[in-house]
Amino acid sequence: MTSRTLLALLTALMLTGPSRLLAQSSQFGARALGLPVLPQSVRGQGIGGGLAMFDAEGSLNPASFGGIRITTASFNIRQYWRTSESPFGTAEGNDTQFPLVIVGAPVGRRWSIAVSVSALLDRTFALATVDTVVLRDEPVEVNDTLTSRGGISDARVAVAYRVSNRVVAGLGVHLLTGVNRLEYRRSFADSNYASVRLRNELSTAAPGVSFGVIAEPTANLRLAGLLRFDADLRINLDSTRIANQSMPMTLAGGASWSPSRRLMLAGHVLHRNWSVADEEIRERGGPGAVNTLEAAGGVEWVRSRTNPFRLPIRAGLRYAELPFPVVEGRNAHELSASLGTGLRFSGGRGSLDLAIERAWRSDGGAYRERSFLFAVGIGVRP
Amino acid sequence: MTRVAWLAALVLVLAGCEDDLTVPGGCPEFCPGGQPQVRDTILLANPGSDSSFFGYVSRDRIPSLLVSDGLAAGETRAWVRFPGRSDTVNVGGTWYPYVIDSIAVELSLQARDTTLGDLTLYYYRLPADVDTLISFDELDQLLIESALVDSLQIPDSVRQGALRKVFIGEALDRLAVPPADSGVLALGLRMRAAGPSGLRLTAPAGGLGQNFVTYLRAGNEDSTAQTITLNVQTNGYVRNNGDGPFDPDLLYLGWLPSARSFIRFTLPDSLLDRTIQILRATLELTPAAPYTGLPGDPPQIEVRGLVRDLGAKSTPSLFVRSASTLPQEGVDVLQVDVRGIVELWRLGIDFPSTLVAALAPEGASFHQPVFHSSRSAGGTPRLRITYLIPARVEQP
């Protein structure tokens, strides 16, 4: 099987395969467009997201895979366990997600191409509410459940061009697409009232484009930059256009420094002007949106100089502001700490990366969440 | 290879985990798109379009016999008539006269007032030509001491089931059938209890039969023992307060011959909108007289929709019915949930928005409810609909 054949097969798999290409469920994803997701590999996750701008198996920066020399396909599996707290109670939950599939291949000496599908915003949640309403002059207890599955995925075709031995530039063409299936159920303690079950399907679509660059000014220092624009998101309810949603511009910069052959430090800062969506979200009754800044940094320590892919130790921290507050005026954020490792086998043709992450989310008030993540990344290099 | 196996196992374990997404929520913070609104509306019956029709269950098709004594709901008496019994029996191809050893009359108890004891059923001999034309007064005058055959004490523990009375000795003489009656035996029934009460007996149309069993010995040399069992031929009951007069401006359910009431509504366009969800639809009927019947034996009000509205002979829908138990007493508004029927009206198929109400068991209840109609000064039949307008949860 040639590299091109494999690439075609995996691309087809991505387009027809996992439907739950999402990140984690969270109460902080219940408002507006949901919870933002950083499209990174499990290796990058182990470094706390610090490697995202340089991550050849991530899809943030279209220049990041410019250095690959062999066709590479990888996908991630993430298992979350979380505890959510709010004024309405505390609950524990878990979910399994598949947030990233990517295939990249070199084309000639200078070009590379990558196709990826990743989660951009996750709107998977289930909210259970107990309330009492007055029906026919009598108080009746009601149980409401609003379940949402889906979100917005980012399908990207990107090309990277090696300008010189020290500079790689990339261009990504994006299609934001997603399906959000909502189900609302209401049951009444008084069985004389019929239960309610409503289903809606929300679909979204928008094109986008991203430009990225990675430069290596010195032998052990790499710098990266990213600029991304997305057109207005078209939101359809069961094939009927209900809204056009402005999407933010993304601006990011990163650095990677390797003081020795066994140690690498990497980090990035990313900004999105989500406030462009604020007014439209408020007009639809939402709590608005705020600009966000995130910063991540981490380290990878190679234990064996002769076999750098054998169980390196990775660690990192990431802080990110969340664009959609649960309560208007209370901006939420998340802080996560990660550890990871990995190995290659079968002569380097297969790879397995593992990461664990502890995350804390809060809006500074009564809404808090703690989550634990276990991620597995599988890579194939035929 | 071992690594690949471990990898495969890990992937399977993770992929097989079951999601548990639910967290507690509340509004407005966790109600994206707002809360659904619940509204209540009352539709009055179309003026002048509600009416009652009689004759759905006739006197010879009743499912039960009613017998009472001093009951406020009404005095009732019942009768049964068996077909003619042959005066010979066949033994070995030869017909012989016979000698009666005993006779059993089998009836079946459907309901009684279980709060009262000392329930006794009395059997009276009636003329063989008794039929459904007999009036209450006529039958009551026949149930006199001289016609009494015997009685059956019904134990307090018996609430339903077979009532078997065996007649022997002198009672047999009172059950002798003269040749002029062609072997036909007719019995009248009345009852007594520790207080005003009543009971309901199964009539053949309602299921179990009533039997007249004769145990005899044939007049041959061996006096062969035989049994003649005759199922009831006809039966009925009469009551002292069931013949009207009937006010055309009121709605009647039950009675005998039985009445059904047709009530018509017009559903507004706002309720025909398929996006709204009907939570409850209740037909409310205001009684024009206090409910009264046999304690512990309330009938049900059955309400159906119609396939076609052709007046009294309309075809009721067989698949969707609603029912509610009639209050034992009082003057409370009767409520019957008819959401399933109203949903039929919203289907867009040409179902008429008409409800037909009937009593069950029809033609066999001590209750004879009467309700106000749209022509009454007050208490017009109404349809109370509680519905939900969904929130715009679909919009982020």
Image (spheres, coloured by chain):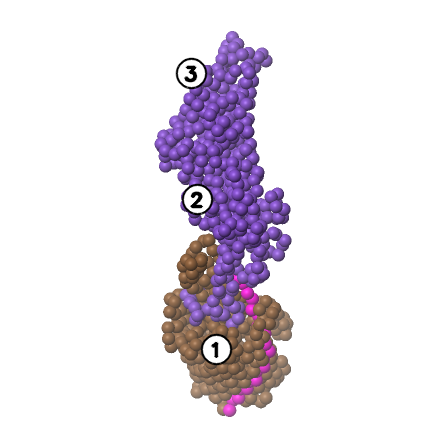
Chain colours: A brown, B purple
Gap in angstroms between the C-alphas marked 3 and 1: 98 Å
Image location of residue B105, percent across then percent down:
47, 24
Q: Which residue is mark 1?
A: A288
Gap in angstroms between the C-alphas marked 2 and 1: 60 Å
Gap in angstroms between the C-alphas marked 3 and 2: 46 Å
Please report whichever mark, 3 or 2, sits nearer to the chain's N-terminal start.
Answer: 3
Instruction: Tell me whether the residue at label 3 lies in contact with that at label 2, contact meaning CB atoms closer than 8 angstroms.
Output: no
The secondary element bearing badge 2 is classed as loop
Image location of residue A355, percent across then percent down:
44, 73
Q: Which residues are magenta?
A: A197-217
The secondary element bearing badge 1 is classed as loop
In terms of depth relative to the viewer, which is nearer, A187 or B189?
A: B189
Could you tell me which chain the residue with mark 1 belongs to?
A
Q: Does residue B387 appear in this view?
A: yes
Q: Residue at x 56, y 66 (%)?
A: A201
- For badge 1, the amino acid type reads Gly
The secondary element bearing badge 3 is classed as helix
- For badge 2, the amino acid type reads Pro
Q: Which residue is mark 3?
A: B170
Image height of B199 relative to B320, above or below: above
Image height of B320 relative to A131, above or below: above
- For badge 3, the amino acid type reads Glu
Horizontal side, residue B171 vs residue B319: left or right: left
In terms of depth relative to the viewer, which is nearer, A224 or A111?
A: A224
